Image (spheres, rainbow, N blue to C red):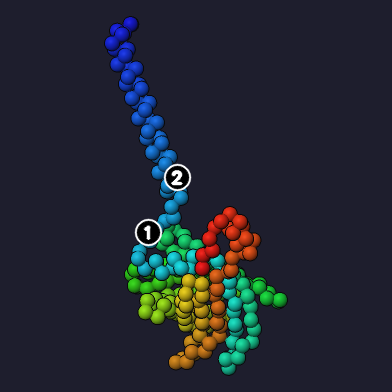
Amino acid sequence: MFLSLKCRNRLKSFAFFVSLTSIFWTHELVAQEKKDLAEPIADYSVPQMAIFEGWIGVWNVTEHHFDSKGHVISKVKGTEEVNWILDKRAIRRSYRTKSASRSYHAIGTLTWDASQSRYSGTWYDDASTTGPTLTHGTWSESTKVLEFVLESRAADGSAVTYRIVDKWHDEKHRQVTTYQVRGDALVKRLEVEYQRPAPCPETQQSDRMIGVPDID
């Protein structure tokens, strides 16, 4: 069957329009995909998770261990890396230290528990034989302190409770103090200094060579 010249011209015009439309929408989708990949997730699952934005990244840690009389008995260094998981519904903490005699690795999680109106989390490590440690706590905006109760079990199965005070000094420094709860008394057992790693000298030199200004 032969189509008239007028009909063929209409079909050509329609095909050209469809082609242009397809190219336009493909370009828009690719541009939006690139934009989505380039921009970090800004929204939190709940507003209470926003406090952890300052935790994200790598920290150098220095532990000071205390005996029951408050004397420092050892000092250990390591790192902690904190990342968002589950579309900012929780954070994941990977904590590592190493001394001359042993290494230690722990994985922790923290999230907001709306049913209890508090933060809740878990802590697994390669030293405990009694399962995960459970934590729950609250944040004070006025003092910049995240205070936790940590509950675990000793090797004999007895309950052990600690109070954790995570003090935020500034964007580069935190101090976390662990107290063992003994009746009405608190016995300091561990103090950890958190500090952001200094930039590599090579990176700073490269920035100067390409004209990138220093940022304090």
Q: Give the vertical position of 90 relative to 187 (above or below).
A: above
Q: Which one is nearer the viewer's eye here, 19 or 93?
A: 19
Res 125 visible: no
State the CA–CA distance, disc 2 to disc 1: 18 Å
The residue beneath circle 2 is 34
The residue beneath circle 1 is 43
Expressed as whole percent of the image width and height from the top left, the position of residue 180 reads: 51, 86
| Number of residues whose C-alpha sits closer than 10 Å to that of mark 1, classed few (under 14), some (14–19) or many (20 or more) | few
**Circle 2 — which element?**
helix
Q: Give the vertical position of 96 relative to 140 (above or below).
A: above
Q: Cβ–Cβ below 8 Å for labels 2 and 1?
A: no
Q: Which one is nearer the viewer's eye here, 136 or 1?
A: 1
Expressed as whole percent of the image width and height from the top left, the position of residue 171 reads: 48, 71
Expressed as whole percent of the image width and height from the top left, the position of residue 103 reads: 66, 72
| Number of residues whose C-alpha sits closer than 10 Å to that of mark 2, classed few (under 14), some (14–19) or many (20 or more) | few
Res 50 visible: yes
Q: Which amino acid does label 2 sit on?
A: Lys
Horizontal side, residue 4 vs residue 207: left or right: left
Q: Which one is nearer the viewer's eye here, 156 or 171?
A: 171
